[in-house]
Amino acid sequence: MAASRTTSDTGAGGTAAWELLLPSAAAPARSRGRALQAALRDAVRAGRLTPGTQLPSSRELAADLRVSRGLVTDAYAQLTAEGYLSSRQGAGTWVTSVCAGPGAPVPGPFAADDRGGPSDFRPGLPDLSLFPRAAWSAAHRRVLTRLPHRAFGYPDPRGLPELRAALTDLLARRRGVAVDPDRVVVCSGVAQAHTLIGLVLRDRGERRVAVEDPGSPEHTALFAAAGLEAVPVPVDGDGLDPAALAATGVRAAVITPAHQFPSGVAYTARRRGELADWARERDGLLIEDDYDGDFRYDRAPVGALQGLAPDRVAYTGSVSKSLAPGLRLGWLVAPPALAAEVAARKRTMDLGNPVTEQAVLAEFIVSGHYDRQLRRCQRLYRTRRNALAEALERRFPGARVSGIAAGLHVIVALPARYGPEPRFLTAAAAAGVAVRPLSDYTRRGTGGDDGRVRLVMGYAHLSPAEIDRAVRLLPQDV
């Protein structure tokens, strides 16, 4: 048969491609196309069709399976859009990706984050392929030969002294943070930093904390786990509303002033001053999440709010956007009045972070590798943000991209003719595109009554070609 000649030795055990797809051809007519797509996708994921495999032509495969050529053409087009296949006019269709290996486990209830596919615009993920493997590995070898034996004992719960010193210089130089090494606590990312602060506040008798609305659902979840109720406070074009904050009566608030998530605004100088004044007058605490403060594309990044009120701000950050979230390396700069309690909580929580990874990060910062990594990411992410804006304008004339030129996501408002929003989201999912609406991040609605579809779109993990292809998959007629 034609298909077996094309792929006679491409699958596991020499199985021909058409044999893997035979069950889908027997599906009911209405679901046959979806069944064929699923069978092809599963064969690639499981490794039965390996990268580099040339698939039969649509005409040949349709003849072998006794289905319409249109079904095969549509299946090839869909999997090409998803990144499993690639095709060139006159050269055929090829397998390009394996998303899991043979025998890969089925994800359980605590499965890893599944973001990052070629048609996935959900925000928050950097380009993991940019992780500097060679430089990190070389630094790892260097620190292993240099670390004394005593370094592998139980560490200072605040973190390796070399790393805290390196972070002190880095944060003062790049983010304008007022800090000394004794107030730096190395954490397993910003999540642990917020948990530590939440537990300390709970120990001190606090029961509520203000969060931005719209804002990150993670803030609500993390402080709830620490025993604090999250109280939403509205965000306007200048930042968190200080009058609304004062009206809540809370004494702690979580903020993202450099690049508010998800609205994309930068807190104005006046609003920063008003919030610092609130913290002093209320004997309160601002918890600054500087999740992507290094990534500003139109000007130098605005410094951290912490520099205005070091005694009233707990500053948090990590390498999750600059290197990789899987490293689980972050930091908390605690106000002097909380530093000892935070360190004590860190000790009882996990006795400190792994020594070698801390030493490697310290080496990375001191040697200049970290600054070079930031510059590399900035160049690429700026290009990808521009590519997304241009692709949206081509596909959806009148689309508005808002938020400062920074970070790893934008807010997109599509003209009302592409709504209503629920129907658009359903059609996008059916087309294989993952996207989040702004309404997922707020308790107050989407922030407008003009009928526009409002989306929070991440772009950093996608190449310009993937961005263009995924935007073209978004529905226009809903």
Image: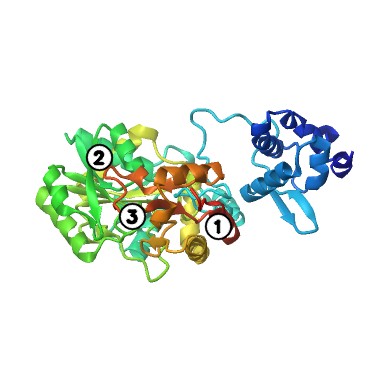
Q: Residues within 10 Å of mark 3 (few under 14, many from 20)?
A: many
Asked if residue 54 shows in the view, the reply is: no
Between the C-alphas of marks 2 and 3, the distance is 33 Å
Mark 3 or 1, nearer chain start: 3
Residue 180 position in % (x across, y down): 30, 56
* Residue in the image at 24% along x and 64% along y: 268
Q: CA distance from mark 1 to mark 2?
A: 46 Å
User: Can you give x and y, in whole percent of width and height, for residue 218 in the image?
Assistant: 36, 41
Point 65% across, 38% down: residue? 100
SS of the residue at dot 3? loop
At x 72%, y 47%, the residue is: 73
Q: Is residue 289 visible from the viewing direction of this image?
A: yes
Q: Nearer the viewer, residue 425 or 407?
A: 425
Q: Amino acid at mark 3?
A: Ser
Q: Classify 10 Å Cα crowding around label 2: few (below 14), some (14-19), many (20 and above).
A: some
Q: Residue at x 41, y 50 (%)?
A: 419
Quarter where residue 61 is shown:
top right
Residue bearing mark 3: 263
Q: Secondary structure at mark 2?
A: helix
Q: Is residue 425 above or below residue 136?
A: above
Q: Nearer the viewer, residue 472 or 219?
A: 472
From the viewer's side, name the closer residue of 65 and 197. 65
Residue type indicated by callout 1: Ile
N-terminal of the pair, mark 1 or mark 2, is: 2
The numbered mark, 2 or 3, whose residue comes first in the sequence reads 3
State how far apart marks 3 and 1 are (Cα).
21 Å
Give x and y (percent) for residue 276. 17, 57
| Above or below, comparing residue 340 to residue 298 in the picture | above
Q: Secondary structure at mark 1?
A: helix
Q: Which mark is residue 341?
A: 2
Q: Pointer 1: what residue?
A: 467
